[in-house]
Amino acid sequence: AIQNFDIMFQHDGSGQMRYNPLSANSGFYYVRANKKAQYVFTSLLYDGAFVRKCKSHQQVLVQILLEHSSFFGTKVKVFDKVETDMFPGGFHYHQDWDVMHDIVSGKSNAYILHMSWTENKDNKLKFLRQMGEWYVQDQCIGHDYLELVEGGGQVTDGSLINQCCSAEPIFSCHFRDKPSKEPCFNSPCIDKRCRQFWNPMAPEFVAELKAKRKALN
């Protein structure tokens, strides 16, 4: 039973040797509050030099998980990247568009979308905005609490919720070759392949285009 595991991970989706055989993603996981799990992360702290050397805490954590499962009986679960649709990540966002179409259409059972496999924070923000999953006002992005509430900051009443949080998703298009809540046909591509997420020749879009042309005439 799933209750018997000490740590449960989202699948990274990568086939890189350094993450094998578990391919556990260290950006999203559940940890049971027990001694075995605590020892895993104590060991990770002790291996800080190794993390700096290989420039990946995920690589080090995967090796620690293997050691602890063998030596101490730590029970580790990595959810299957295909069979489990509750925890999609960067692998699905960039490669498995059947999953992403289910998410934007509301058919998915996903609890979270971990925007891994993404080069930088700027692109993560753009991807989340065009997915309709961004709720932070522009005036509060890139500022810490003291900057916002002191010294003539953007927040005047001490409430970050009212000033910084949007009740509705803040949507904007950025790349037509990445998943989006609405079609972004007029946006540029970010990848060389430029494979569009939405098919502009799909019947619903062709019908819409014909209706617009008819209205103009």
Image: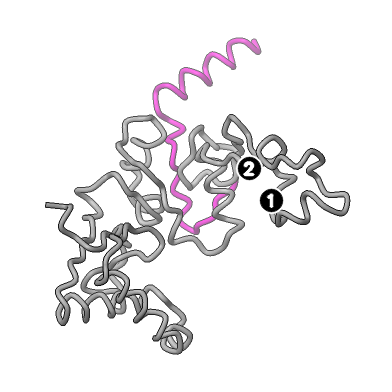
In the rendering, at what x and y percent does residue 17 appear? 28, 78
Does label 1 or label 2 sit earlier along the sequence? 2
Crowd around label 1: few <14 · some 14–19 · many ≥20 (10 Å)? few
Q: Is residue 204 above or below residue 145?
A: above
Residue at x-position 78% and y-position 55%:
147
Amino acid under label 1? Ile
Residue at x-position 50% and y-position 57%:
191
Tell whether 138 sits left or right of 29. right
Q: Is residue 161 above or below residue 78?
A: above
In the image, residue 209 lies in the stretch drawn in magenta: yes
In the rendering, at what x and y percent does residue 201 appear? 43, 30
In the rendering, at what x and y percent does residue 177 appear? 48, 47
Residue at x-position 44% and y-position 59%:
116
In the rendering, at what x and y percent does residue 159 appear? 71, 40
Q: What secondary structure is found at the residue carrying circle 2?
A: loop
Q: Which residue does the numbered mark 1 point to in the structure image?
A: 141
Q: Is residue 202 above or below residue 14?
A: above
Q: Which portion, as a residue range, is magenta? A: 188-217
Name the quadrant of the C terminus. top right
The outermost residue toward the right is 152
Label 1 vs label 2: CA separation? Answer: 7 Å
Q: Which mark is residue 136?
A: 2
Amino acid under label 2? Val
